[in-house]
Structure formats: structure tokens, C-alpha cells
Image (cartoon, rainbow, N blue to C red):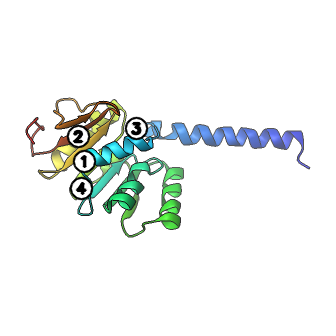
């Protein structure tokens, strides 16, 4: 039988794990938010993600965007995550559920990643994190790359398509701040 003190310790450990999982990424300035399935579908649809794409997911979290883009759209995906527990879970998920050949998980700071290989970037970050990432994307993305963002628009960029219901914005990078011309 488990004693009352052991139950309390297990409950405290469970609460600590949840708090850590939800709030640890705040230390890196990104914060954790789950991406709901309808939002992920909208992001992938608006960006027209397909088998020839290399989609980067900075702040990959639990991999909602990462795995769906690989499984359902055949894209090669790169998830970037700094929080070690999430990285371990993403790698375990990749190993157990795959597709191993199209999903890569990088344990690193999303502000230090090389985005040059990306044909698409799926971003669900808080405004402050996006403000820091924006000049990196502007310096590294190739013309024609797509950036799809949930909830907040990218300051100074003009979306080429919008899903107002899910608050998803698609931008096309042309080597300068995107315009409304597709």
C-alpha cells in the first residue's frame, strides 16, 4: 500500500512536471502553447505544404505541426526545440511513430538555427519571440519561401492569404518584406 506521504510526494512531483513542461520554454523567451488540429490543418493548407517542401517548426513543442506536415503532406520537417523534456518526447515520438526519414528534431535555441534550407516555416510563437526571429528569417530565407503564422501577424509584413476563422496568416518571402502580390 502507498502511504499518505508517498501519495502527496507523487502528486507534488506530477504538479512539478506539468509546471515544468508548460513553463520551461518561457526561459528561452518563447513560451509553450499547444496548436489545435484545426489550426494545424489551416496552416498546412494555406502554405500548400507538399512532398517537395522542407518545413521548419521553430519552438516545435509537442510536434503537432512537425508530424502532420511529414505524415499527411510528405514534407521533410525540422523541429527546433530548446526544452530538453520536449526534445526527448519529440525524439521518442519520431522513433515510435515516425516517419523517421522525414522528421528531424534539433535540440537548440530557435534563434541560433539556420533557416536557409527551409521552403516553409510554420510559426506559432509569442510576439516577443517572433520579433527576435523575424530578422533572422529575413536574412536567411530564400525568395519564394513561405512563412505561415498562427494568432499574431508579423509586424511589417503583409499576408498574401488569411484564414480569419483560425487566425492563420500566410506570407511569401521575396527577399524583401512581403507584399500582397502573390
Looking at the image, tell me whether mark 4 or mark 2 is earlier in sequence order: 4
Q: Which residue is mark 1?
A: 47
Q: Of circles 4 and 2, which is in front?
A: 2
Quadrant location, the C terminus: top left
> Residues at badges 1 and 2 in contact (C-beta under 8 Å)?
yes
Residue 106, image quadrant = bottom left
Q: Which residue is mark 2?
A: 170
Q: Residue at x 27, y 42 (%)?
A: 148
Disc number for residue 118: 4
* Residue 104 point in image, percent of width and height: 38, 62
Looking at the image, tell me whether mark 2 or mark 3 is earlier in sequence order: 3
Q: Of circles 4 and 3, which is in front?
A: 4
* Residue 52 point in image, percent of width and height: 23, 63
Q: Residue at x 20, y 37 (%)?
A: 161
Depth check: 161 or 155 in front?
Answer: 161
Looking at the image, tell me whether mark 1 or mark 2 is earlier in sequence order: 1
Number of residues whose C-alpha sits closer than 10 Å to that of mark 3, classed few (under 14), some (14–19) or many (20 or more): many
* Residue 163 point in image, percent of width and height: 28, 35
Q: Is residue 107 visible?
A: no
Number of residues whose C-alpha sits closer than 10 Å to that of mark 4, classed few (under 14), some (14–19) or many (20 or more): many
Looking at the image, tell me whether mark 1 or mark 3 is earlier in sequence order: 3
Q: Secondary structure at mark 4?
A: loop
Q: Which residue is mark 3?
A: 30
Q: How far separated are the C-alphas under marks 1 and 3?
A: 23 Å
Amino acid at each position: 500500500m502507498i502511504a499518505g506521504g508517498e501519495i502527496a510526494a507523487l502528486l507534488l512531483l506530477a504538479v512539478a512536471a506539468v509546471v515544468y513542461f508548460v513553463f520551461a520554454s518561457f526561459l528561452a523567451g518563447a513560451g509553450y502553447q499547444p496548436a489545435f488540429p484545426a489550426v494545424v490543418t489551416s496552416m498546412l493548407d494555406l502554405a500548400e505544404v507538399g512532398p517537395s517542401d522542407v518545413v521548419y517548426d521553430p519552438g516545435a513543442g509537442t510536434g503537432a505541426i512537425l508530424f502532420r506536415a511529414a505524415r499527411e503532406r510528405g514534407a521533410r520537417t525540422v523541429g527546433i526545440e530548446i526544452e530538453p523534456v520536449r526534445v526527448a518526447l519529440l525524439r521518442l515520438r519520431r522513433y515510435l511513430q515516425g516517419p523517421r526519414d522525414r522528421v528531424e528534431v534539433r535540440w537548440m535555441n530557435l534563434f541560433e538555427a539556420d533557416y536557409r534550407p527551409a521552403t516553409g516555416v510554420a510559426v506559432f510563437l509569442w510576439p516577443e519571440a517572433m520579433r527576435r526571429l523575424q530578422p533572422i528569417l529575413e536574412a536567411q530565407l530564400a525568395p519564394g519561401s513561405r512563412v505561415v503564422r498562427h494568432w499574431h501577424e508579423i509586424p511589417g509584413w503583409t499576408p498574401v492569404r488569411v484564414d480569419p476563422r483560425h487566425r492563420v496568416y500566410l506570407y511569401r518571402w521575396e527577399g524583401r518584406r512581403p507584399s500582397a502580390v502573390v
